[in-house]
Image: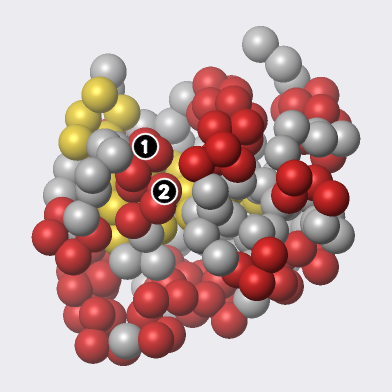
Amino acid sequence: MLAWDTLAGQCAQCQNCPLAQTRTHVVFGDGRQDAQVLFVGEGPGEQEDLQGRPFVGAAGQLLDEMLALVGLHRTENFYIANVVKCRPPRNRDPQAGEMAACMGYLWQQMALLQPKVVVCLGRIAANQLIHDNYKITQEHGQWVERNGVFFTAIYHPAALLRDPSKKPDTFADLRAIRDKVRQVCTRTQLLSPFTPPAGS
């Protein structure tokens, strides 16, 4: 198994699909490399491409705020990555060939992490990690267990920006995620919603 630095270096040099020709930065992932909780989105947007970090734009800021309410913070107790590591042009959905070319990096990240809880952010990530006909409006918040790893999906934070009426469902899902983390993630310390993480 590759070490984190080796895997990140290989990903940074990747030319496996045409997205390599239009990217500013590869967006490998962010958070604790010993985390038991993994969040997975579909792909970087404009700000992520410019900064080289996942979920740093408006949707990412909303996600961080929501997760803080249930004691989760990327510098403290989870890792976050995407199905594809380079931004699709005009933020379109990643194409099948692009995802196929990139999924190996995510599988290797998961092998290094060995997470106990995996949360898909939106339908596209759920299609790749849960099942290929995932319907986010019907199945969000449901749990699937495979070999001791618990998978679920919530609405992508960009969808919440477009349609705030989905927020109550998402907060209910996040509370269930918090409860699942408490149940199965023996090394994960949830923060108080009112205590900022160290260094913030």
Vertical side of 95 occupied by 33: above or below: above
Counting from the top left corner in percent of width and height, residue 179 is at 22, 52
What residue appears at the point 73 percent right and 49 percent down from the top-left corner? 19
What residue appears at the point 72 percent right and 39 percent down from the top-left corner? 17
Q: Amino acid at mark 1?
A: Leu
Q: CA distance from mark 1 to mark 2?
A: 6 Å
Counting from the top left corner in percent of width and height, residue 11 is at 77, 34
Image quadrant containing the C terminus:
bottom right
Disc 1 to disc 2: CB gap under 8 Å: yes
Image quadrant containing the N terminus:
top right
Vertical side of 200 occupied by 32: above or below: above
Q: Secondary structure at mark 1?
A: helix
Q: Is residue 34 visible?
A: no
Task: Tell me the quarter of the picture where residue 117 sits.
Answer: top left
Task: Tell me the quarter of the picture where residue 87 sits.
Answer: bottom right
Asked if residue 94 lies left or right of residue 2, the reply is left
Q: Amino acid at mark 2?
A: Ala
| Residue for badge 1 | 129
Who is closer to the viewer here, 113 or 159?
A: 159
| Residue for badge 2 | 125
Counting from the top left corner in percent of width and height, residue 160 is at 36, 80
Asked if residue 117 lies left or right of residue 138, the reply is right
Asked if residue 33 lies left or right of residue 69, the reply is right
Counting from the top left corner in percent of width and height, residue 20 is at 80, 46
What residue appears at the point 37 percent right and 59 percent down from the top-left corner? 122
Vertical side of 195 occupied by 104: above or below: above
